[in-house]
Image (cartoon, grey):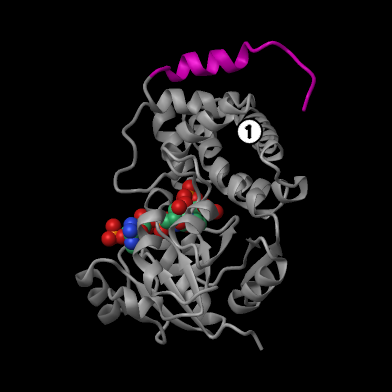
Amino acid sequence: MPAHKSVSVIGAGAWGTALADVAARAGRKVTLYARNAAHAAQIEATRANPKLPGVRLDPTITVTSDIATAADAEIILAATPAQHLRAAVIHVAPHIKPRTPVIACAKGIEHGTHRFMTEVIAEAAPQSVPAILSGPSFADDVARGLPTAVTLAAQDETVAISLVQALGSATFRPYHTSDVRGVEIGGAAKNVLAIAAGIVVGRDLGASALAALTTRGFSELARFGRACGARTETLAGLSGLGDLLLSCSTAQSRNFALGIALGRGEAAPSGKLAEGAFTAPVLVELAASRQIDMPVSRAVAAILAHKLTIDDAIEGLLTRPFKAEG
Ligand SMILES: NC(=O)C1=CN([C@@H]2O[C@H](COP(=O)(O)OP(=O)(O)OC[C@H]3O[C@@H](n4cnc5c(N)ncnc54)[C@H](OP(=O)(O)O)[C@@H]3O)[C@@H](O)[C@H]2O)C=CC1
Ligand SMILES: O=C(CO)COP(=O)(O)O
């Protein structure tokens, strides 16, 4: 019997709503927090969230816009976009009990501070126990109960194990690890690389080019991860390679879809969060500060900043000197 009975999810977007369902399915008492009172009331009344169309909220989930009510839980899942994580955790922090696990569910790196997601939580809620959940899992698949597997990391592996026990079910299978840094780097970097993969598809460069881009993308993700102290097995696991493969293979990924639009010279899909667009400049800054070569991510950041055309970026990548693989 898991020790944690109650779970609150901060952020009622697509992912927060899917995770609330996951926790309810695992038998927890679940509260979903929407910062907008009208949105909270609408979700509570209709049992549906326009951010996750076609999904019915588990009947046992309570929806609230009251942060003190949301904070009264044994586990907090923080499911806002990465650049909003600090504000969300600062808001809930005064109300949470000491040593409450706060699990980052966002994939990104904070602008300005260059902080990874669990570092943001540690600063915003110093009395909490930060953790991170990441891996190949679309909100829609998860909410519909399709089988998914993710990685759940906390510095203390026994904490990670207890969180897995509290959230896991037959169709949502978290694997535990203490390699927090590895998990947060995989989730952040794969979004940037998914934009590049989408560009390859949008430009009709062919399936061989897509495989080459994805593989070279993984090579730079792993290079960056190892330089930051991540373990190779984590980078090659669900939250690294696994999520990269998912996000570089289907337009169900918003980052991949953004890349396709860019590659075709079309406008970005409107109203869709593509975290990679926010992560790209920070990832490139961090890599440069550590002298880590990330040519694909650098090209994505330059394209998004309108400093490089797509054709010039492709030519630049294709005319790099030949070298040993690695
Ligand atoms: N969607 C997916 O399939 C997956 C998403 N993720 C990650 O989850 C994160 C969120 O993505 P997703 O849910 O899809 O995004 P959405 O755009 O669907 O939703 C984001 C939600 O965050 C809320 N929010 C923003 N700031 C705050 C705040 N300060 N306090 C409380 N709520 C806040 C927004 O509220 P409001 O409506 O009021 O603006 C909105 O409901 C991203 O980092 C993404 O990479 C990870 C795995 C899968
Ligand atoms: O992280 C995700 C799947 O694991 C969701 O991907 P997108 O944010 O690109 O839609």
Kindly give the residue lying farthest to the left in the view shown: 38
User: Quadrant location of residue 189?
Assistant: top right
- Relative horizontal placement of residue 188, taking residue 325 as reference (left or right): left
Q: Can you tell me whether the CB of the residue at mark 1 lies under 8 Å from the nearest atom of ligand 2?
A: no
Q: Quadrant of the C terminus?
A: top right
* Secondary element type, mark 1: helix
Res 174 → quadrant? bottom right
Task: Give how far across and how far down residue 283 sits, in percent.
Answer: 52, 34
Q: Nearer the viewer, residue 205 or 221?
A: 221
Q: Is residue 86 visible?
A: yes
Point 32% across, 73% down: residue: 67
Where does the N terminus fall, quadrant-wise? bottom right
Q: Position of residue 11 (x, y in %)?
A: 37, 64
Q: Quadrant of ligand 1?
A: bottom left
Query: Which residue is found at the position 29% from the left and 44% from the top?
Result: 270
Percent x, y for residue 116? 53, 47
Question: Which amino acid, mark 1?
Answer: Gly
What is the span of residues highlighted in magenta in the rendered image? 307-326
Magenta-span inclusion, residue 67:
no
User: Mark 1 = which residue?
Assistant: 217
Residue at image point 55% right, 32% down: 286
- Residue 320 on the magenta span: yes
Q: Is residue 158 left or right of residue 43?
A: right
What residue is shown at x 44% (from left), y 41% (from top)?
Answer: 257
Position of residue 167 in the picture relative to residue 236 (left or right) = left
Q: Quadrant of residue 295?
A: top right
Position of residue 186 relative to residue 68, above or below, is above
Residue 51 shows up from this direction: no
Q: Nearer the viewer, residue 125 or 4?
A: 125
Please state if 99 lies on the left or on the right of 223 as rendered.
left
Residue 63 spot, x, y in % from top left? 33, 78
